[in-house]
Amino acid sequence: MSGAAGAVDATKVYGVGDAEVRALDGVTVAFETGKFTAIMGPSGSGKSTLLHCLAGLDTLTSGATYIGDTYLASLDDKALTELRRTKVGFVFQAFNLIPTLTAEENIKLPMMLGGDAGDPAWIEQVISTVGLTSRVKHRPSELSGGQQQRVAVARALASKPQIIFADEPTGNLDSTTGAEILDFMRRAVREFGQTIVMVTHDPVAASYADRVIFVADGKIDGELADPTAEQVLDRMKHLGD
Ligand SMILES: Nc1ncnc2c1ncn2[C@@H]1O[C@H](COP(=O)(O)OP(=O)(O)OP(=O)(O)O)[C@@H](O)[C@H]1O
């Protein structure tokens, strides 16, 4: 184990016989604390499966995933739920906000569910950094897509999780709004020391990361440090070569 989270020889097989798909085929990877890592690869290469197994939302066929110094397979359902609630933040493509709650209530909800009020000064700082101070009393339907995703990012950051997993967080946003969200995620890493792992299809989104890991056919197929969008695009063209 090293870093904030990772996988060791992770294999995930869906289906049996002719229908068998090896979504992950021996993936070993570690995610450094305080870094922003992007995972890229062609459609069907196993990115979402990897993210879900790392986050404890899905289980492996063999191998292991860990968060901090805890192997996820060592936990029962209750302990896994507790670990997800306290150590992990999530940002998905669909913003997954509760429509009847205000932005502020959505941001605080994961902590309140655990009977934890959180750190009010920190939550205020997060809300102000994402530029939501004037919108916190609004419900999701009264917010733009970009504002809703800012609420989702603020919700992920509010409990200061050990790691945030993001699955195509800008997939539903126009490029300007997407850039604002990515810029904020990068600031959360640089200024607050947050650790973020993000799956994306978009080389421009990946260029915000400190490191890009490439996945092809369920295997790790190289990586780039401090990538530009051009380098990522070029690398994507030659995946699996
Ligand atoms: N629940 C499932 N049952 C059967 N096969 C699955 C299941 N989930 C994923 N797969 C298969 O596993 C492989 C990897 O899927 P995964 O969603 O991880 O890829 P991805 O790289 O995230 O793709 P995309 O970029 O299109 O979202 C694919 O071949 C997919 O069809």
Image (cartoon, rainbow, N blue to C red):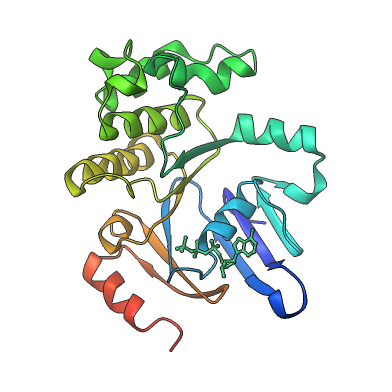
The image shows residue 164, relative to residue 143, as above or below, that is below
Place of residue 220 in the rendered image (x, y in percent of width and height, measured from the top left): 53, 73
Displayed quadrant of residue 177: top left
Image location (x, y in percent) of residue 74: 81, 47
User: Where does the image place residue 131, in percent across and percent down from the top left?
Assistant: 24, 24
Q: Which residue is at a point 35% across and 76% down the rendered structure image?
A: 236
**Residue situated in front as seen by the camera: 16 or 76:** 16
Image quarter for residue 154? top left
Q: Which residue is at a point 28% across and 59% down the rendered structure image?
A: 207
Quadrant hosting ligand 1: bottom right
Q: Residue at image x 65%, y 18%?
A: 114
Total labels drawn: 0
Residue 209 or residue 93, whichever sits in front: 93
159 left or right of 212 in image: right
* Residue that lies at the very extreme toward the front in this rendered image: 18
User: Residue 12, image x and y in percent?
Assistant: 69, 66
Residue ranking furthest to the left = 176
